[in-house]
Amino acid sequence: MKKDGLTQKQLHERFKNITEQARDAGLTINYANTLPVNTMKALRLTKWANDTQSNQKTAKLIDAIFKAYFVENQNITDNDVLVKLAKDAGLDDSSAKKILASEEYKDVVIEDENDLANRNADAVPYFEIGHYHDEGVPTKEALIEAINNLIYQKAN
């Protein structure tokens, strides 16, 4: 509410819209009950997985973190939660513990954040498709148009 200058009613409307858009896309989100947490640990863990694991395992981890946070409203700052998610995704839990106990990959996450800040992106999700840039949750039509424009640009 503070960040975007919203009233409580506007915030609940935003949560409702995001939840409905997710449902229309086949996703379940319990957005109104998500915990306001810092995602640095989860981002560091996914960076580690991306560098050291198969794309399939990394995708499983990302999906598990998404579900834990947005559907089950788990605390993804808790190392035990993240280690369990990593293990369930087929990653080595002792390696995941070591990453989370360190500051490893923090610089990579900060570099990504700085890159987005340089693009004037200060909200997630953030979409960049060709010349199309959007923060927040774009409409399906806007994404289709952006993809079609990119295809047209590449064809010419």
Image: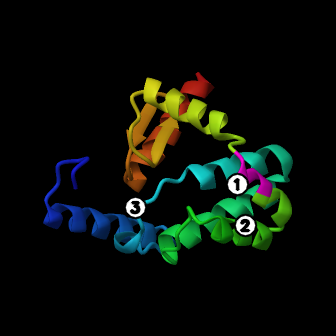
Q: Which residue is drawn at 16% across and 65% down?
A: 8
Q: Which residue is drawn at 23% across and 47% down?
A: 4
Q: Mark 1 points at which residue?
A: 100
* Real-space CA distance between mark 2 and mark 3, rounded to the nearest whole angstrom: 20 Å
- Closer to the chain start, of discs 1 and 3, is 3
Is 47 or 18 nearer to us in this picture?
47
Mark 3 crowd level (few <14, some 14–19, many ≥20, 10 Å Cα): few
Q: In which quarter of the image is the C terminus?
A: top right
| Circle 1/circle 2 CB separation < 8 Å | yes
Q: Name the residue under label 3.
A: 36
Question: What amino acid does circle 1 point to?
Answer: Leu
* Real-space CA distance between mark 1 and mark 3, rounded to the nearest whole angstrom: 19 Å
Q: Which mark is residue 83?
A: 2
Furthest-bottom residue in this view: 72
- Closer to the chain start, of discs 2 and 3, is 3
Mark 2 crowd level (few <14, some 14–19, many ≥20, 10 Å Cα): many
Dominant secondary-structure state across the stretch colored magenta: helix
Judged from the image, the secondary structure of the residue bearing numbered disc 3 is loop
* Real-space CA distance between mark 1 and mark 2, rounded to the nearest whole angstrom: 8 Å
Please state the horizontal and vertical placement of residue 115, each as a whole percent of the image.
Answer: 53, 27
- Closer to the chain start, of discs 1 and 2, is 2
Question: What amino acid does circle 2 point to?
Answer: Val
Is 81 or 22 nearer to us in this picture?
81
